[in-house]
Amino acid sequence: MKRIALIAASAVVFAGAASAQQPATPPAAAPAAPFIDWDKIQIKTTNLGNNTYMLEGQGGNITIAVGTDGIIMVDGQFAPLSAKIKAAIAAISPLPVKYLVNTHFHGDHTGGNENFAKDGAIIVAQDNIRTRLAAGTKNGITGAMAAPRPAEALPKETYIGGTKTLQVGGRTAVLTHVTNAHTDGDTWVYFADANVLCTGDTSNNTKRYQTIDFANGGDIRGMIAANEAYLKASNDDTKIVVGHGPLAKKSDVAEFHAMLVTARDRIEKLVNEGKSEAEVVAARPLAGLDAKWAANDAAAIAFTRMVYNSFKRS
Ligand SMILES: [Zn+2]
């Protein structure tokens, strides 16, 4: 199930890009249809305690923190799910979403931006997200292009580095930028009063490799730094809302972090020896890890390329 969901999520991004390159392709809404039946997707709400909730549907996990006068939301999934997500939020609280935080620019986390901004939500993100959404982006593995997003989808409140604090009545979210990790615009969010930490796609709990978007500033060294920050910020009771997969614990993050460190060590060594990307891929340096973390051979090769290219970013 989890694997299918992830493949479908990526497929939508690529399919959308493909149609942008081939305007002759049938209706604009068509690309997503073969991969995701939006009507069948249900939003599952999990109560994390202290008026904080995790919502799962299709795409990146969502966190909802309810204050006395408004809501802080972290990530918004795909646009076709916005109505269902709004209904799930309304079932929790009648208050409006005051802030929608984008953990990074990928469409399975930002697709709903316009729909929530329309209702008055202020989109908040690290500033590179604004520029990448406005310009459109290229996928480093497939070469697929994602079209620029309209002005309403762009973050209105941004920050460059360090932390940014958001508040609604009685609730505080601390946003922290981690440099060059999953992308170059990652934010993780901590709600201290609920001991809930939201990682976006800098971590996952699918027990699979994670995309490192090296064409958009992603770098395995930043992924490692991010997960080290989570281990430092959390205890055994911390509820960790990862980008994809079920609610995680500190021990899940520790396992994911150990995988990243092994992958970095093995591939950095080959990079330092001057090996080319093709040579590194052929050497299968992650064999052993692949057996556990790669969904299939293509995923094993893609992750090897992502780690290798982390060291080749210009
Ligand atoms: Zn992502």
Image (cartoon, rainbow, N blue to C red):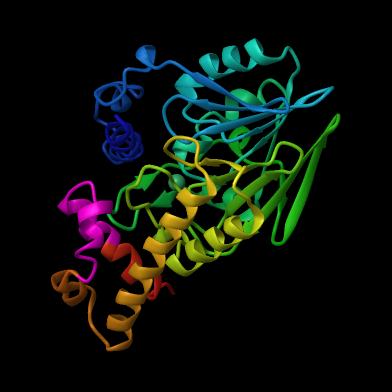
Point out the image quarter for the N terminus: top left
Point out the image quarter for the C terminus: bottom left
Magenta run includes residue 71: no
* Residue 245 placement (x, y as % from top left): 42, 37
Residue 263 vertical placement versus 80 (above, below):
below
Q: Nearer the viewer, residue 86 or 203?
A: 203
Q: Nearer the viewer, residue 120 or 176?
A: 176
* Residue 88 placement (x, y as % from top left): 58, 15
Residue 314 vertical placement versus 102 (above, below):
below
Q: Residue at x 47, y 57 (%)?
A: 254
**In the displayed structure, does residue 251 sit left or right of residue 119?**
left
Residue 57 appears in the picture as rendered: yes
**In the displayed structure, does residue 275 sit left or right of residue 191?**
left
Magenta run includes residue 297: yes
Magenta residues, dominant SS class: helix
Residue 10 vertical placement versus 208 (above, below):
above
Residue 49's quadrant in the figure?
A: top right
Q: How many dots with numbers? A: 0
Q: Nearer the viewer, residue 227 or 115?
A: 227
Residue extending farthest front: 236
Q: Residue at x 79, y 47 (%)?
A: 165
Q: Residue at x 58, y 50 (%)?
A: 129
Q: Residue at x 53, y 58 (%)?
A: 227
* Residue 30 placement (x, y as % from top left): 30, 22
- Read off the magenta span: 285-303
**In the displayed structure, does residue 167 sit left or right of residue 258?**
right
**In the displayed structure, does residue 184 sit left or right of residue 171?**
left
